[in-house]
Image (cartoon, rainbow, N blue to C red):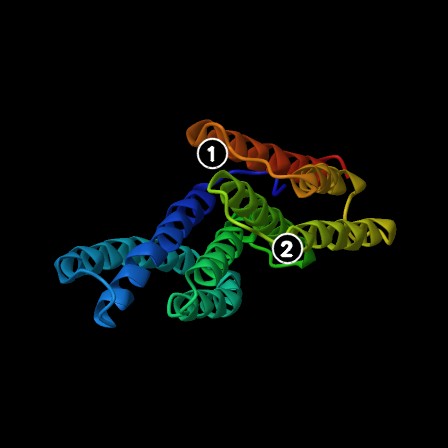
Amino acid sequence: VAGQWNVPAFLVLVGGLAGFLIRQPASVYLRIRNGKGRRSDESLAAAWMVILGMIALLCLGALLAMGLLELLWLLVPLTGIFAFYLVATRQRRAAMRTLWMELAGAIGLAAMAPAAYIAATGQLDSLAWALWLLLAGQNALGVLYVRTRIADTHQRQIDRRPILWVHILVLIALMLAALVGQIPWLVTLPFGGYLLRAIWVASKVRPVANIKRFGFSEIAVEILGGLLIAAGWILY
């Protein structure tokens, strides 16, 4: 979408990935400190927090040294998302705790799209925020779909109405945005496909036959969706 590739964009991808991965050792460390984990894992979790944190900070420092101060604006919502993730780790209901943790991680990871765009262009504009919202929406819908399929696989009861209504509302919002010219129409195409998939999974129990194959297929779906979103602006 930015139309170019450079060193700052590469630093964003490396630092962003490190920032995304740090959530797991951070949550493990906090659970251990609260007496809910094995003490033997505390030093390992702390070490990975330091390593990943240093990588993220070094990349951020290099980007700021290059004058890309616009990236600091992304830290405001990202800090809130990370705090929400840590709060979710302390919820008592395991199912809800995992759901909110996964959603926070998915939305946080989507911030790499606007960050890479800003790094490549040096601009923080409406397109950067739109990229975040679109990728965050795609990731969040993917989380809901995967959790439904996994629940079916383990024969757990799950309310199927929320996943269907969330997909419908997201698609309606995007179609309205396209109608007024805020986003390209092509961007709505993958979300239409996600809605069809939600209707399919909401109609009956859909257990997963092969978890590994299912995981790789979901990665492929997310990549294809991201490419269609990018193509929407390239052809706009």
Residue 186's x, y, as percent? 76, 38
What separation in Å lies between label 2 and label 1 (alpha carbons)?
A: 23 Å
Three-letter amino acid code of the residue under disc 1 = Gly
Q: Quadrant of residue 194?
A: top right
In the rendered image, which quarter contains the C terminus?
Answer: top right
Q: Nearer the viewer, mark 2 or mark 1?
A: 1
User: Residue drawn at (25%, 66%), measured in percent from left and top?
Assistant: 36
Looking at the picture, does residue 59 appear above or below residue 197? below
Element class at badge 1? helix
Q: Nearer the viewer, residue 89 or 127?
A: 89
The residue tagged 1 is 215
User: Residue drawn at (32%, 62%), measured in percent from left and top?
Assistant: 27
User: Residue drawn at (54%, 48%), measured in percent from left and top?
Assistant: 143
Callout 2: 10 Å neighbours few (<14), some, many (20+)?
some
Q: Is residue 191 left or right of residue 117?
A: right
Residue 87's x, y, as percent? 41, 71
Task: Give whichever of discs 2 and 1 has the lower sequence position.
Answer: 2
**Label 2 with label 1: CB-CB less than 8 Å:** no
In the rendered image, which quarter contains the N terminus?
Answer: top right
Q: Quadrant of residue 233?
A: top right
Residue 222's x, y, as percent? 57, 37
The disc placed on residue 133 is 2
Q: Is residue 169 left or right of residue 115?
A: right
Three-letter amino acid code of the residue under disc 2 = Leu
User: Residue drawn at (46%, 58%), measured in percent from left and top?
Assistant: 95
